[in-house]
Amino acid sequence: MTTEQLVSYEEAVSRYDPVIGLETHVELGTVTKMFCGCPTTFGLPPNSAVCPVCLGLPGSLPVANRTAIEYTIRIGLALHCTIATWCRFARKNYFYPDMPKDFQISQYDEPLCTDGWMDVSVRGETIRVGIERVHLEEDTGKSLHIGGATGRIHGADYSLVDYNRAGIPLVEVVTKPVPGTGALAPVVARAYVTELRDLLRSLRVSDVRMEEGSLRCDVNTSLAPRGAAEWGTRTETKNVNSLRSVERAVKFEIERQAGVLDAGQRVVQETRHFHEDTGTTTAGRSKEEAQDYRYFPEPDLVPIAPPAEWVEQIRADLPELPAARRARLQSEWGLSDGDMTSLRNAGALELVEATVAAGASAAEASKWWLGDLARHANERGTELGELSVTPDQVARVSALVRSGTLNDGLARQVLDGVLAGEGDPDAVVAARGLAVVSDDDALAKAVDDAIAKSPDVAAKIRDGKASAVGALIGDVMAATSRRADAKRVRELILQRLS
Ligand SMILES: [Zn+2]
C-alpha cells in the first residue's frame, strides 16, 4: 500500500528532473534451451520440457547454444555495440525456488556486447538512448501460487513450480541512464521499448510477445531537483509487461518520488512492483548489490570467443532495420509523419505493406486497416494481424471500389462477410448481391420515385439549385439498400430535372 503523498505530474516535472533507465529481458526464439537440448515451446504441460541439465542435477554439464550466441551478437550489432572478442559466462548465486541450480548462469563483468545506442523518435524529436550492455543468460522456471486473491505468494494455499522455462536463453539489454527528457520521460521510456521490440522482431531473434512474457522490462527512475549537480536515488520497477505500463510506471514513480522528496525524506533504493489495475507501484525487496551475488566465472563452460569473420558475416546478414525501413516506406508511400505514427501504433505497418504489394495504394490500404478493420479488432479485443482477413483480400476490396463495382458502404459489408468466414471478397459480393447498381434501367424507377416523393426539392433543382440534389440521392440510396452508384444517380436526377 502506498502511504506516500503523490505530487501531480505537471507539478513534479516542473520542479524535478527525472532520469530513466531500462533493463529489458528478451527470451530468444531458439528451438532448444541455452545449455541443453530441451525444447523452448511455450505452453507445454508443466515440467515436460526438462532434463538433468536444466534441472541442475548432480553431474550434468551445460553446453552453450551457438544459435543463442549468434542471436545475441545480431542484437548487439543492430544496437551499434562493440562485440567482445573473448568473454565468459558467470555464476550469479542466489536461492529462488524456480531456479533449481541455486545459481543462474549469466554474464557479469564480461558481457558479449557493450557500448551501443539506439535512436527513438518522440513527437518529432530524435533521442539517442545509450546502450550499456547486451548479455546472455538463462531464464528461471515459473512459480504458480495457488489460492489467494492476487496470484502472489502472500495468501496462497500452496505453490507449484514449472521448470519448462528454466534454461531458455534470455538476453538482457541494459540502457545507460537517460537524463534530460524532462516531462517526456514516461513517453520516451515507452518509445524506447516499442522501438526495441520492433528491432528485435525485425532481427527474427524472438517473437517478442509481452503478454507471454517473452519481453519483460524493469524500469529505473530517479528524480533530482531541477538543476541539481547529482542524480537522485533510483528505484527499479520490476517486470512491467506492457508498453502502456512502462509509461504509467515511470509517471507514477515521478509523482511518488516527488512526494517523498517534498516531504524532506530520501528515496529508498529498492525494487518495486507495478500494479496494472491501479497504475501504482509498491515496495518490494531492498535492492541487492552485485557483491551479494558472489559472481564468479562459470567453471563448466568454455569462454565465448566469436571469430571476427563470423561477426562480420552476421553484420552483413542484418536485415533492413525498422527505422530505415519506416523512412523508406514513408517516402515511397508519400505519407505524413502523423499517418506513419498511426500505422505503427496500430501495428499495421506490415499489413499495409503487404496490401500495397498486393496492388492497393498506400492510402487505400491505410484507410481500411486503420478504419473499419481497426474498429473490428477493437471490438473483438484482438490484434489487427489476427483478424481473419488477409492483405490480399483487402487489396481486392480496394480494387473493387476503384473499378466502381463497390462503393465504400458496400465494401464495408464485403469486409464484414470476409471476417464472418463467408469466403473471398468476390464470393461475398456474389452471395450477398452487393455489387453497385449503375445500370440506368435498374436505377430509373428509384430515381423517378424519389423525384415524385419530393416535388418541392425537385422544383428547387429545376430552378438551378443543384445543391438540393443530395436529398434525392439519399432517397435513391435508401431505396436501393445503398447499392446505387451515387455518381450515376446524380447524373440521372439532373438529366430528368434539367
Ligand atoms: Zn534441459
Image: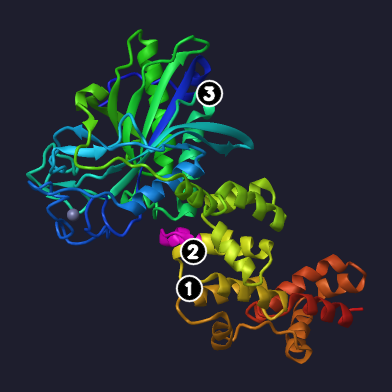
Residue 257: image location, x then y, percent: 38, 19
Ligand 1 positioned in quadrant: bottom left
Residue drawn at x 23%, y 42% as measured from the top left = 301
The reply to whether residue 310 is visible in this rendering is: yes
- Please state which amino acid type lies under the numbered disc 1: Leu
User: Is ligand 1 closer than 8 angstroms to the Cβ of mark 2?
Assistant: no
Task: Identify the magenta region.
Answer: 375-384
First in sequence, mark 3 or 2: give its number. Answer: 3
Residue on which the image places disc 3: 182
Q: Are marks 3 and 1 in contact (CB under 8 Å)?
A: no
Characterize the local packing of mark 1: few (<14), some (14-19) or many (20 or more) Cα atoms within 10 angstroms.
some
Residue 407: image location, x then y, percent: 68, 74
- Please tell me whether residue 170 is drawn above or below residue 496 in the rendered image: above
Residue 286 numbered tag: none
Residue on which the image places disc 1: 419
User: Quadrant where the N terminus lies?
Assistant: top left
Magenta stretch containing residue 440, yes or no? no
Residue drawn at x 48%, y 48% as measured from the top left = 309
Is 437 positioned to the left or the right of 279 in the image? right
The secondary structure type at the circle numbered 1 is helix
User: Is ligand 1 closer than 8 angstroms to the Cβ of mark 1?
Assistant: no
- Please state which amino acid type lies under the numbered disc 3: Gly
- Please tell me whether residue 149 is drawn above or below residue 443 in the rendered image: above
Give the quadrant of residue 246. top left
Give the quadrant of residue 154. top left
- Please tell me whether residue 387 is drawn above or below residue 131 in the rendered image: below
Residue 23: image location, x then y, percent: 38, 35
The secondary structure type at the circle numbered 2 is helix
Residue 376 numbered tag: 2
- Please state which amino acid type lies under the numbered disc 2: His
